[in-house]
Amino acid sequence: MVLVAHGSRDPRAAEATRALARAVAAARPGGSVWASWLDHTDPGPAAVLRSLAAAGHRRAVLVPLLLTAAYHRRVDIPAALAAARGSGPPIEVRVGDVLGPAGGTVDAGLLAGLRRRLTEAAPGRFDALVLAAAGTRDAGARGSVGRVAGALGAELGVPCRVAYASAAPPAVGAAVARLRAAGAGRVAVSAYFLAPGLFHDAVVAAGRAAGAVAVSGSLTDAPELAALVARRVDRAVATA
């Protein structure tokens, strides 16, 4: 299993990916799990795949640690696969779905992980919610974030609005302010992030400044997320 994260200059992000890889390995004893990054942190996925092939492995499953199927899934990961296949011994690679909605379906494990982090941050009652994502200009990716917000709000029985840290409106502070202006007394922010970093820090600061009662931590190595990665591996193998 090769996990592929976006990558960040913030060292906390790489450590979060390593923690998730350890959690997946613990959930799947006997299987080897490798972490890789598309940018900023080594090794990249092509290097990991080449090293596995050189060590005699003939098959691998690559799981994108991404919450939307935007540019990094459509362009960067295929480019990494092409680079791996262009040199060294051959290796068969099956690519799993991103961790966000796949085929329009929001995985129950993803929602459970978001609920876990919300409970940790906001053990008390809240009556409205903002799902805060990093942001993208890709309309399809924004639609998938909206599906997660709808599903999370339905599970919790509260209105849930989407906000972004960059690239698209509304900003987190504006979304919190609108819910409060509409009568919500206690608004929480669910951070739709796999790892801590500058964007998550910005969401925390903006949410608190706008009066949110709590902002959740990133998913990192939540057991529900590790189980979701394992399901993506199983699905990739079963549907190949």
Image (cartoon, rainbow, N blue to C red):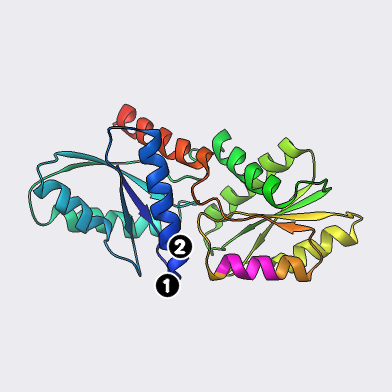
Circle 2 SS class: helix
Q: Residue furthest top?
A: 238
Question: Does residue 28 belong to the magenta stretch?
Answer: no
Q: Which residue is mark 2?
A: 13
Residue 107 visible to the viewer: no
Q: Position of residue 86 (x, y in %)?
A: 12, 56
Residue 217 visible to the viewer: yes
Q: Quadrant of residue 216?
A: bottom right
Q: Residues within 10 Å of mark 2 (few under 14, many from 20)?
A: many
Closest to the observer, 205 or 150? 205
Q: Which residue is mark 1?
A: 9
| Magenta extent | 199-205
Q: Position of residue 194 (x, y in %)?
A: 51, 54
Circle 1 SS class: loop
Magenta stretch: helix, strand or loop mostly: helix
Instruction: Please identify the quadrant where the C terminus is shown.
Output: top left
In the rendered structure, find residue 207 and report the number of the disc placed on it.
none
